[in-house]
Image: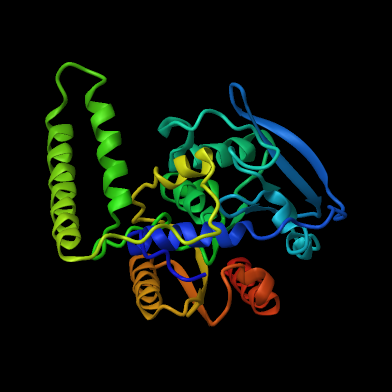
Amino acid sequence: MKRLEFLPLGLAFFLSQALLAQGPSRPPDVTPHSVQFVTVQPGVKLEVLDYGGTGRAMVFLAALGPDAHDWDKFAPKFVSRYRVYAITRRGSGASDHPAPTDENYSADRLGDDVLSVMDQLKMERPIIVGWSVGGEELSSVGSRFPAKVTALIYLDAGYPYAFYNKAEPEPLQERAELRRLLKEAEQGPDPSLDLKRRLLASMTRNEEELRKSIQSDEKSQPPPPPPPGIPPMPPELNAIMMNPVKYTTIPVPVLAIFATEKSSDPDENAWENRQIDAFEAGIPTARVVRLAHARHDVFATNEAEVIREMRAFLQSLTSK
């Protein structure tokens, strides 16, 4: 999919990959697994697929929009050594769809959902695999509770929602951070000195970005309308998109497989490569693999390579 020219580059990438991930409707589900619903918050249950297997738990997280059944062909390939699960996040598929508020769909709220499923199903330090925006939940869990996981595997999932590149900040993240800080300040009559400083820094960054945006708009032609054929974003998915967190420290073993050169737009490819370089430089525990000209659903288009890299990485964990 060509980059959406009416959006900032990072946000356009986020949305285009979300739409690509949704894809056509899938065939009937014939993969052996059981289905259960786990309550992660009062009034919110998530669909959890259990593919069986033995050994340490391995949990698969879907992209933005698709549900756990996107793993029906891929996840069972690991049941010989792991107990394999997949989770449909809130707002998607058969899981509950709470109101699309910032609080209900913040990045760390989604991470807390994964932690709740892990706790209730008694998973001890699982390996978590995330595709696309699933990387957001990986980083939420791994940055806040590294002792609760054995390793994280990002499948074309290490973009700004999963790792914040300080050299190239995304306006979406800056605005989300400012909203959170303003809400925190509203909880009491006198914000702390630390909160005031963080608010001022966030306001300054947002002001700088806004000035740049205005200057750019004044010099450029009016943006074209959205390309035809792009469906409206469901409000739940929009709420997820609008609530990323700046994750910069992920102190657990990481495998990150990126599908590179996906676009015909050289600017988008250059931006993507800079983000991959930042991810690799910023996470010393990460093994980064680049697969040129693969698709976003890299585990489907390059299945053999992805399985080989995953098995080698998992073997390296057991040999340490």
Judging depth in this view, the residue of 134 and 29 nearest the camera is 29
Q: Is residue 72 left or right of residue 138?
A: right
Q: Quadrant of the C terminus?
A: bottom right
Which residue lies at the image location 52% right of the left edge and 47% below the top edge?
Answer: 232
Above or below, 193 relative to 137: above
Residue 8 placement: quadrant: bottom left
Q: Residue furthest bottom?
A: 292
Position in image of residue 128 (x %, y %): 59, 54
The colour scheme used to paint the residues is: rainbow
Position in image of residue 223 (x %, y %): 31, 60
Which residue lies at the image location 71% right of the left edge and 42% below the top edge?
Answer: 48
Q: Is residue 169 left or right of residue 154?
A: left
Position in image of residue 96 (x %, y %): 64, 32
Which residue lies at the image location 50% right of the left edge and 48% below the top edge?
Answer: 137
Judge whether residue 252 can be spotted in this image: no
Above or below, 217 relative to 271: above
Judging depth in this view, the residue of 86 and 206 nearest the camera is 206
Q: Residue furthest top?
A: 189
Q: Is residue 307 left or right of residue 81?
A: left
Position in image of residue 129 (x %, y %): 60, 58
Judge whether residue 296 can be spotted in this image: yes
How many numbered callouts? 0
